[in-house]
Amino acid sequence: MKDFDTAEIAYVPTTGVRQVQDAPLVAATEEHLRGYGCLVDQPKSFSVEIVRWPAQGWRPVDENSGDQDGVIEGIFEFW
């Protein structure tokens, strides 16, 4: 972890962020993706199984939620 000067980034964080986490850059290979996903050569014919996410802690996943979305495409921004 490194402390950083918020003036050195393009926007001022609104969440009180005060540190940057270094994350290693790793080439996407079948071995590196094992347990997370896989490489796909033909996306139009690739079947994706949609499953309900697991409940965390004491609260169960609400009925009719967690597995209803499907495939989403687009440009996404997140912080």
Image (spheres, rainbow, N blue to C red):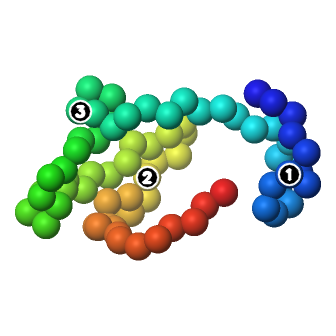
Q: Quadrant of residue 43?
A: bottom left
Query: Where's residue 69, x and y in %?
Result: 33, 68
Q: Are marks 1 and 3 in contact (CB under 8 Å)?
A: no
The answer to whether residue 34 is seen in the rendering is: no
Using the numbered discs, state the Cα–Cα distance from disc 2 to disc 1 in whole angstroms.
41 Å
Element under disc 2: loop
Q: Give the residue type at disc 2.
A: Val
Q: Quadrant of residue 20?
A: top right
Mark whose residue sits in front, 1 or 3? 1
Q: Give the residue type at disc 1.
A: Glu
Residue that label 1 marks: 8
> How many numbered circles does the render carry?
3
Q: Nearer the viewer, residue 27 or 57?
A: 27
Q: Quadrant of the C terminus?
A: bottom right
Query: Where's residue 63, x and y in %?
Result: 37, 61
Q: In the rendering, which numbered label is found on residue 61?
A: 2
Query: Where's residue 57, x and y in %?
Result: 54, 37
Q: Outermost residue toward the bottom? A: 74
Using the numbered discs, state the Cα–Cα distance from disc 2 to disc 3 in whole angstroms.
31 Å
Query: Where's residue 3, x and y in %?
Result: 87, 34
Residue 75 falls left or right of residue 68: right
Residue that label 3 marks: 30
Label 3 Cα neighbours within 10 Å, binned few <14 / some 14-19 / many ≥20: few
Element under disc 3: helix
Q: Give the residue type at disc 3.
A: Glu
Mark whose residue sits in front, 2 or 1? 1
Q: Nearer the viewer, residue 78 or 10?
A: 10
Q: Nearer the viewer, residue 10 or 35?
A: 10
Q: Residue at horizontal 24%, vertical 41%?
A: 38
Going from N to C along the chain, the mark reached first, 2 or 3, is 3
